[in-house]
Image (cartoon, grey):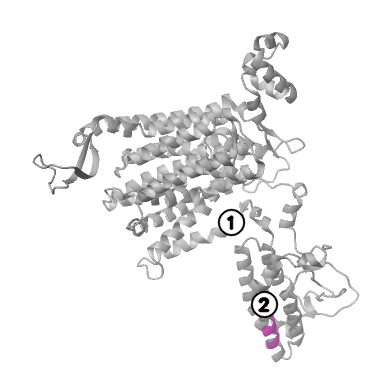
Amino acid sequence: MSAHACECYIPTCFCNLIADACRHLPVILLFVIPGVSHHACEESWEEIQSKKTIRAENEVEANKLVNNYRFGFRKWKSHVTERPFADRSEVVKELYSELNVFLFLVSGQLFTCGNVLYVFLFGWWVSLAYFLVGILMFITIIGVPYCKLCWKLGCYFLWPFGNSIHKVQFVDHCISFFLLHGSQRRFSTYVWLLLGYPLLVVVHSLACFISWILVFTIPVSKMNAQTLGVILLQAPEDHQGYETRALLCCYHAANWYYYKYTVDGINVFAVNLLPLVIVALVIGYIDRENQYASSDVKFAIAIGSIIPLSYYIGMGIASISAQSNFAVGAVVNATFGSITELTFYITALLKGHREANPCLQEVVKAALTGTLLGCILFIPGICMIIGGLKHSEQRFNSRCTGVSSALLFISVGGVFAPTLFSKAYGNLVCDACTNSTGGNGTSNSSGPFVCHNCHYDLNNGTLFHNHVQPLVYTVSALLPVAYIIGLIFTLKTHSHIYDIHVGEGQVTGHHGTVVHWSRWRSLVILIMATVLTSACADLATEHVQPILNQPNISQYFIGVTVLAMVPEIPEIVNGIQFALQNNISLSLEVGGCIAVQVCMLQIPILVLFNAFWDVGFVLLFSDQHLWASIFSVILVNYIFMDGKSDYFQGTALVVVYLILLALYYFAPSPASC
């Protein structure tokens, strides 16, 4: 019986005894328990304890976990299937509940900070609008019934909490309505629809939009939408004796758990950021002369619009992978997994080549290095801090992390091999050398020399073309091979390391499972998001030059921060959510996964692109990039050795990351910039 079989079929307490005995009596154990191999006992008690079983709710979610939560693929938190509403927690049920359910609350519970804030943010001006519209309807005389309605609603929206609106009045603090049908339509209704209703549409639409953008006040948005679409389209009648369902009853204006809210499977924050894409395209391609917005503003909006697009790309990848086999999932992930970053890098290189501006090539290298440093240090570090503050100490599968760490060593070693080679065989040449006596660096000068623009001369290109460039192509061919071997190892031959299975009592097949996005819909969204990402990346590179021309900020710093980490914001959020759920293993895999993709996929693709379309991209990094990356990989491997994490270890990683950022901030800009 294999080690995996031992782990699956022997009870946990018995496995603990086996692991403890293996440390002391490995030979005796083989005779006492036949069928359990010595390999099964190689794992220590801590490793067995730290293994986490990832449970899935149905076969589609399990397939997504298999294709997306192991090495090589990005981690996307959102479910690709609709979760049964009855199985959700009470907190989540409240987020999606309609505002027509009566709750029995103590009156003091209505005076919350959110409700009081509602009065200052929305209540007073919405109520004022109703009173003004009521005066307008009163002037028409025929609209007096609607005037009374507006005054009642004005009082209601000043403090709606605890009160309710019904079709028919049967309790205090309720307003009576009846639907408009046929003969019940009156001339006053047309006056209302022409004069009063359009003004209130503007008011409620504005309140609905603002409260939705604030996210935590989504109940206010629901209340305004319900009023706009239902309540204001009904006539004020005074029929007694009927008791019908409530149209609107609200108790709280804010709920801090709305960060979990999703729209068609997409997180509400990503949905709210999506209009940035339209704004970026409109002002970017129409306002060519920067009459209405400066280049700095256009660059900020273009970079910000990449965040929701990367989220939609990730959701599309996860949806297709979850509904397909391994081969299709691997192709989709490899094709679209790095599309956000690659579109920016390629457009920047093309722009630099057209304008003969080598500075953009250095910015691309800084962005690549910044992504490596952020994914190796910052993402694991911030997840360890937040997870450690909630769960004190967290354990992770050190064997899985060891695979990713080994591949990180291979990746970084391969990417920086040409740089080390050029430093070993190139000649250090310095320009603009001067000394304290005013000499120009000749043999007759004396005193200490101060040199600038030092670089390695590769024998006027001979060493580069005959030795460095073939090495670059060789490394770029080997890294994807290592990537594929890593996929086969973790997804096929040693998939038991991750122990993913369908949770008990859940649906075990596609029957009864409702998927948010079908495969065709996901493919269309992927293509559209990719095209929009390319356009936004083109706008970002078009307006990045004024940012790079800032005299007090190094171009290195801009590359390793803004250009590197903005597209990774969805990944940072996902990693933090995993850590809060005490699943630190997935949090750590988030950063390592992206770092491996940068080295084993993105950089070889850039080298291949440069081979067919020479844009001047040379895989030679500065000393700062080289030693910062190597030091980061060594540090993170040392931190991951014991299979445990806490907030102190996370703090160490984040502090080192901030030190490296400070180093880039104070570093002089590249000579080409």
Indicate the quadrant where residue 294 lies: bottom left
Q: Quadrant of residue 660?
A: top left
**What's under tag 2, amino acid-wise?**
Trp
Q: Residue at x 61, y 72 (%)?
A: 206
Residue farthest to the left? 444
**Front-most of residues 424 and 301:** 424
- The numbered dot on residue 124 is 2
Image position of 628 with respect to 1: above or below: below
Element at badge 1? helix
- Disc 2: CA contacts within 10 A as few (<14), some (14-19) or many (>=20): some
Quadrant in the picture for the N terminus: top right
Q: Amino acid at mark 1?
A: Phe
Q: Which residue is mark 1?
A: 269
- Which of the two residues, 585 or 320, is positioned nearer the viewer here? 585
Q: Secondary structure at mark 2?
A: helix
Q: CA distance from mark 1 to mark 2?
A: 27 Å
Residue 133 drawn in magenta: yes
Percent x, y of residue 600: 44, 35
How crowded pointer 1 is (Cα within 10 Å; few <14, some 14-19, many 20+) is rated as: many
Q: Is residue 204 visible?
A: no
Q: Position of residue 585 (x, y in %)?
A: 60, 36
Q: Which residues are magenta?
A: 129-135
In this rendering, does residue 637 appear at all? yes
Left or right: residue 137 compared with residue 614:
right
Among the two numbered marks 1 and 2 on one chain, the one whose residue lies closer to the N terminus: 2
Q: Position of residue 489 (x, y in %)?
A: 54, 26
Given residues 416 and 343, the one toward you in this image is 416
